[in-house]
Amino acid sequence: MALDRKIAYINLTTGDVEIKPIPLEMRKKFIGGRGMDAYLLYNHAPKGCDPIGPENPMIVSGGLLTATCASATARTHVMAKSPLTGLLGSCNMGGFFAPEMAWAGFHHLVITGKADKPVYLWIHNGEIEIRDAGHLWGKNSTDTQWAIRDELDDEEVKSMVIGQAGENLVTYACVMTGIKNAGGRTGLGCVMGSKNLKAVAVRGTMDIKIAHPVDALEHNKKFIDQITGAKVNQIQGALGTPFIWGATNCWGGVRTRNFQYNQMEYADEIEPEAIDDYAAETMGPHHMTGCFGCQVHCRAQYKIQSGLYKGKYDEGPEYTSLGAFGAEPDCKSIETVLTGNHLVNQYGVDNLEIGSMIAWAMELYELGILTTKETEGLDLRFGNDEALLQMVHNICTRTGWLGNVLADGGIPAAEKIGKNAFDYLIQVKGMNNLHSDERATPGLALNIATASRGSDHLRSRPAIDLYHLPEPVLRKIYSSPVPYDGPLSSEHTEYIGKPWQVFWQENVYMAVDCLGICKYHTVFLGATLPNFEDWPKVIYYNTGLEFTPREIWDAAERCNNLERLFNLREGLTRNDLKKGDTLNHRYFDEPCRRGAPDVIGKRIDRDKFNVMIDEFYEHHGWDNDGVPTSETLTRLGLENEPTRLL
């Protein structure tokens, strides 16, 4: 059955492989996926280890419900110490890899050591083999996957790979599976590259016994109706995630020209409807596709129509590519956005991070902090499409002084560039922010400041705060499964009540990452989508495990605290501008200059923001420095960690 999926410990230095079952008591405490990964990282990563050293464990997982009858359980999670931030490294991607790994017998891999030459892992029906990858080294992410399928003579093999960015140890390199499924954040493709691990290939035909198959299928029908009936998912099925960009830019919540503006003007060519028309023109009316077990189909398929990459097929672009290659560098060409999206997918690099790094460099260039000497003659001004795409190449191949410097990540690059370059870097904990502008939304600003892996819109974002839901509706959502009688506000510009919303969303997102579910199938953008009250039955019918909503909440809170413990051990402090729960000064000092009336002039109030941090810590059971109290650790059963039970 689903609970029979195992954990494998693979040492690339020695070639040793050890396979173990996952005890049920560990499932009850950490569920699976990201939560179990947090336990494994805290227990297996030596304090202060080098992120690109052999001792840094790389953990790959599927969720508890992966490959079962539950809908939209395609997510793969990867965790290690981040080479970008020096703190928690964690990424999540869709596609088909994690289900295939489950059918091959595994829910978790713990990969340590470093191979003396390029290798890939071949995992097939309970067996694990380390194979030579010398012939794959240097290939892009798509060609690598096709070459592995040819070598193994099996079109159904699914692979998690790195492209040239991971090989070149770009600190924000991705892990990739399929054409565009990217584990983008925190640079875990760099960790793979440091281990000389080019790919993990999986193929499984092992049965997974469902505990109560008839009930599981019937219940999943209700889930599908709930998911596909939500208007937000109907829109995503038509326009993909770019619809978020269109709405947000219109309102004035998209940072443009790095952080100088909060709305991109004259952007008709890259609006979601224009991209949809473009994709339909190149691929036909049925141009939307999706991940394993998902009915939404939220990404487009397209071919580039002109330029050097004319005729190249790709998928997307996602919301983040519109910011990375559109709003932030102020480039208004659909071909530039789609070409940039294609390049990052092939090189295997975080589109969000590389776009932000280039936009930051563009502002430094226009300020005179960078000159043509550092850019080697490249005119790195905003709106220069050719310079934008050239810098993608330069960074991923570490070409030229600036390409090499930017490949190391924002904080190291700021130190090398000097002057006051760091002041213009829109980062938290060393990781660049999404192309969103949170100055008009204190709750979302609190989210990015306190997220466990750095500036992040997928860790605790209360996105429904923008819907102006009536307070009784908010209270119904945010009072389950733990009662909450504190303040709540329907106004997104308010500060009151937002710490609880961020805390609640943090536990929701941890829970779905433990289960292996897509965040678009929970209370992220859709207030009526599944949450704690909906998950016990789907868990029970598929696995036989019995959880109450409160037990799922407790497990999520336990796992979030493990991530906090890891970060604290690796140097996180509350107010550190490079490793803390705080924001770039521009959030506090510079008001929004464009957008709707409720946006123009907005900035984050420092005093109110600090009160929000205090309240957020209090909800967690942390002290004023953000350290879990002994009472909190005892309540969650973490007082003896690391226990090294698994």
Image (tube, rainbow, N blue to C red):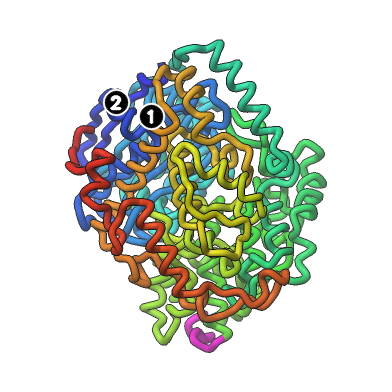
2 and 1 marks in contact (CB < 8 Å): yes
Is residue 502 found inside the magenta-colored segment of the image?
no
User: Which residue is the site of mark 2?
Assistant: 22
Residue type for callout 1? His
As drawn, the label of residue 467 is none
**Residue visible at 49% across and 12% down in the picture:** 212
Q: Quadrant of residue 574?
A: bottom left
Q: Earlier in the sequence, mark 2 or mark 1?
A: 2
* Residue 482, horizontal then vertical, whole percent: 44, 40
Label 1, secondary structure: give it: strand
Residue 488: image location, x then y, percent: 55, 54
Residue nearest the observer in this picture, 534 or 516: 534
Residue 199, quarter of the rendered image? top left
Residue plotted at (36% across, 48% down): 192
Residue situated in front as seen by the camera: 619 or 408: 619
Does dot 2 land on a helix, a strand or a loop?
loop
Number of numbered discs visible in the structure rendering: 2
**Image quarter of the N terminus:** top left
| Location of residue 588 in the rendering, given as x and y in whole percent from the top left corner | 50, 77
Residue assigned mark 1: 107
Residue 74: percent from the left, percent from the top? 52, 33
Dot 1, how many residues are within 10 Å of its Cα: few (below 14), some (14-19), or many (20+)? Answer: many
- What is the crowding at mark 2: few (fewer than 14 residues within 10 Å), some, or many (at least 20)? some
The region drawn magenta spans 367-376
